[in-house]
Image: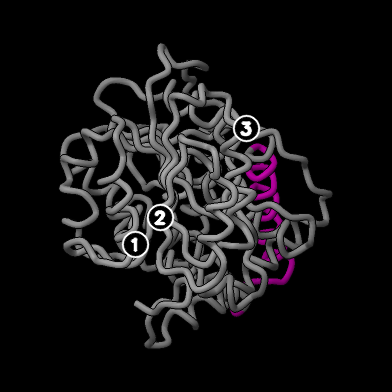
Amino acid sequence: MIFSVAYFIVFFLLFATLLVLFAFYRKSYPGQPASFPRVSILIAARNEAHTITRCLQAIEQLQYPKEQLEVIIGDDASTDDTRTVVDAFIKNKPQYRCIPVSENLGLARGKANVLAHLAREATTDYFFFTDADIVVPPTWITSMLASLQPGLGVVTGITTIAGTGLFARLQAMDWIYALGLMQVVTDLGLPVSTMGNNMLLTRKAYEATGGYEQIKFSVTEDVAIFNKVLQQGFGFRNLYDRKVLAFSEPAPTLPDLLRQRRRWMRGSMHLPFYMVVILVLHAAYYPVWLPFFLYTSIGVMMGIFGLKLLLQSIYLRLCLKRVQLPLPPWPLYLLFELYLIFTSVLLILYFLIPSGVSWKGRRF
């Protein structure tokens, strides 16, 4: 009983603090870079024939001088028509290249290995990373560069899910909400992580780490390189702004979602302790709330549930407003809470099953 009461006090104080900080404490950054240097866009692709055209079309719409762009796609032994689709799109576009990747470099495996090859091919001082199923905004390059101040090695944008179906909308709310929690911490100057589908690394910072080929293999290669960059003394910046908002394809089914989140949970093992505390407090809510029925009335229980739902919904609305996304109807916030409960329980059970991580038809 005493533990439960103490937990709820800490939980709601922390939640309220994060909400206030997100609402009233935010950093602003220049809207345009001081210059327009040549930059490299690096895309790892494996069996992405059905998505990569949208990705490349978005890059074509970037508000950046085309002669200052270098786009390098790595075909990671695709077994579908990825290479054919890419070659057709980049024909007569000299700023694009597609290279086959078949050999491993050093310690790199999987996606990290492709990125290691692409970084070696890049000829500029700025590496922009995205995925083959991502649609970046036209202002992506300019806004990321504008936020790159002296001493920084990595700049991270924000990504959410595209789609109009209920499952896709709930996933989109999940991404926006989780990244919003992370943003409060990074705005305080505390590092958390990056997102490899929306990331800028300077060549100087990347090479200081030795590159992906010198980093112990991880299924979350973006987290691994982020930590190495910080260890080399470089700074970071996370942006939560419409100008750097990219869209990913949703996980089509629940099993696909669980496989994706299992891989992310592996990466969460390397998060700093303060972010782990926030995530653990958040994840422990229902394991503490349900046994609380033994000590109190249903009215108190529903009040505690309602307070969490209210704070969470307000936080999520603030997140959506900041990146100028449509606000869902209020009943969807309740469905989102049920989605979090259901997927969290399944993910914990799934994570405990002793098996590897599946990515693009490979197991690690």
Q: Is residue 32 above or below residue 46?
A: above
* Magenta-drawn stretch contains 309: yes
Rendered image: mark on residue 126: none
Where is residue 18 drawn, in percent x and y?
A: 51, 40
Tell me the element at label 2: strand
Rendered image: mark on residue 101: 1
> How much space separates mark 1 and mark 2, taking CA atoms?
6 Å
Left or right of 18 in this view: 199: left
Q: Amino acid at mark 2?
A: Gly
Is residue 214 visible in the rendered image? The answer is yes
Q: Residue furthest top?
A: 34
Q: Amino acid at mark 1?
A: Val
Q: Residue at x 44, y 67 (%)?
A: 3
- Magenta range is 294-318
Count every numbered label the image shows and give the total: 3
Tell me the element at label 1: loop
Q: What is the quadrant of residue 278 in the picture?
A: bottom left
Q: Residue furthest front?
A: 92
> How much space separates mark 2 and mark 3, taking CA atoms?
21 Å
Rendered image: mark on residue 74: 2
What residue does disc 3 label? 61
Left or right of 362 in this view: 118: left
User: Which of 221 and 279 lies nearest the eye of the viewer?
Assistant: 221
Q: Residue at x 53, y 31 (%)?
A: 140
Q: Amino acid at mark 3?
A: Gln
Where is residue 129 drawn, in percent x and y?
A: 42, 44
Count neighbours of disc 1 (C-alpha within 10 A) and say few if under 14, some if 14 to 19, many if 20 or more: some
Q: Residue at x 59, y 35 (%)?
A: 60
Is there CB contact under 8 Å for labels 1 and 2? yes
Q: What is the quadrant of residue 305 in the picture?
A: bottom right
Q: What is the quadrant of residue 76 in the picture?
A: bottom left
> How much space separates mark 3 and mark 1, taking CA atoms?
27 Å
